[in-house]
Image: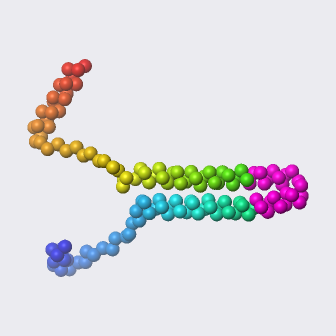
Amino acid sequence: MNSLNKLNDVFNIDTQVDLPVVSSVLENQESDFDLARNTLRNLIFKNEDAITELLHISKHSEHPRAYEVVGQLVKAQSDIAKELLNLHKTKKEISSDSPENIKTQNNILFAGSTSDLMKMISAQKAKTIDSK
C-alpha cells in the first residue's frame, strides 16, 4: 500500500475510491423474510377483526350471503396461516442450502507435470476403448 501512495505522489493522482457497501445475500433474504412474515401476520390480524365484525353483522341480518362472506373470509384466514407456515419451511430450506452449511468439501488437485497428466489421460482413453 505504501508503494501505491508513492506512485500517487509521483503522478499527482488520488486513487482512493469509496466503494459502495453491498449488502450480502443473506441480509437481503433475512429482510425479505421479515417483510413477508410481517405482511402475513398483519393480514391475519386484520382478517380476525373483519371476521368478528362480519359475524356480528351476519347474526343481526340473518342473511345467507352475509354468512357466505364470513365463510370465505375464514377460508382466506386459514390459507394465510398455512402460507405463514410455508414461509418458515422455505426459510429453513434456504438456510440449510447456504454455503455456510457445507460440512465437507473435497478439492481434487493434480500435482504432477503435463507429461504425467497426458500419460494418465491416454491410459484412461485406452481403458475406455478396450472396455467397449
Dominant secondary-structure state across the stretch colored magenta: helix
Tell me which segment is drawn in magenta. Answer: 51-73
Magenta residue check for 60: yes
Seen in the picture, residue 16 relative to 77 is either above or below; the reply is: below
Relative to the observer, which residue lies in front, 43 or 124?
Answer: 43
Give the position of the C terminus as an image quadrant.
top left
For the question of whether residue 41 can be seen, the reply is yes
Give the position of the N terminus as an image quadrant.
bottom left
Relative to the observer, which residue lies in front, 123 or 94?
Answer: 94
Pinpoint residue 125: horizontal percent, then vertical percent. 19, 27
For the question of whether residue 7 can be seen, the reply is no
Count of numbered circles in the view: 0
Pinpoint residue 104: horizontal percent, then vertical percent. 30, 47
Seen in the picture, residue 110 relative to 76 is either above or below; the reply is: above
Pinpoint residue 131: horizontal percent, then vertical percent. 23, 20
Q: Quadrant of residue 114?
A: top left
Pinpoint residue 45: horizontal percent, then vertical percent. 68, 63
Seen in the picture, residue 5 relative to 34 is either above or below; the reply is: below
Seen in the picture, residue 123 relative to 20 is either above or below; the reply is: above
Horizontal arrangement in the rendering, residue 74 relative to residue 21 (left or right): right
Relative to the observer, which residue lies in front, 59 or 14?
Answer: 59
Horizontal arrangement in the rendering, residue 49 relative to residue 112 (left or right): right
